[in-house]
Image (cartoon, grey):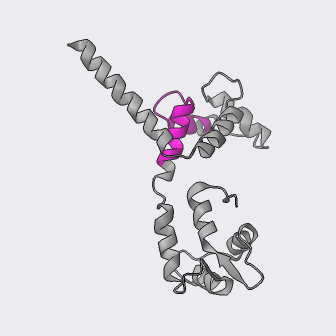
Amino acid sequence: MAPKKAKRRQQQGEGGSSNVFSMFEQSQIQEYKEAFTIIDQNRDGIISKDDLRDVLATMGQLNVKNEELEAMVKEASGPINFTVFLTMFGEKLKGADPEDVIVSAFKVLDPEGTGAIKKEFLEELLTTQCDRFTAEEMKNLWAAFPPDVAGNVDYKNICYVITHGEEKEE
């Protein structure tokens, strides 16, 4: 009887990890794999404190405390292989609303259904309501999503990038 339980447990574990892969598009998984490979400096398939220290050093962060590195590694439940790495990103992204929900929120501001809203209107909303954007955040927004010549902002593209992390290829 014990072998059956072990087998069932293993299948559930495998199913759990395959769920992680179903959360992302193939192109996203490939990008995460590339990031994992860059971070895994010693190429042993596991991200360690030394890997993190080395990759942070290549980005100019030379005085990272050992406690900070330990805290990063402890965010995972065990050794950080690619599946665990992907799971960690999946958990972080789980709180983000799905693309259709975010698009629906923007559609409220677009009664004609054009897929775009005026830059001035969006800027007024973002700088005067709730979590107000700073001038620097607005500058970054317009750098990433410049309005067209008529001053319209393609909110569907913004929604795509929020949920996928990259621009749609036309």
The answer to whether one can see residue 95 in this image is yes
Seen at 71% across and 35% down, the residue is 38
Relative placement, left or right, of 7 versus 48 is left
Which quadrant of the figure has residue 35?
A: top right
Seen at 51% across and 63% down, the residue is 99
Seen at 75% across and 43% down, the residue is 61
The picture places residue 39, in percent across and down from the top left corner, at: 68, 34
Q: Give the range drawn in magenta.
A: 69-91
Which quadrant of the figure has residue 110?
A: bottom right
The answer to whether one can see residue 130 in this image is no
The picture places residue 27, in percent across and down from the top left corner, at: 63, 45
Query: Which corner quadrant holds the N terminus?
Result: top left
Seen at 72% across and 73% down, the residue is 142
The picture places residue 31, in percent across and down from the top left corner, at: 66, 42
18 in relation to 138, above or below: above
Which quadrant of the figure has residue 164?
A: bottom right
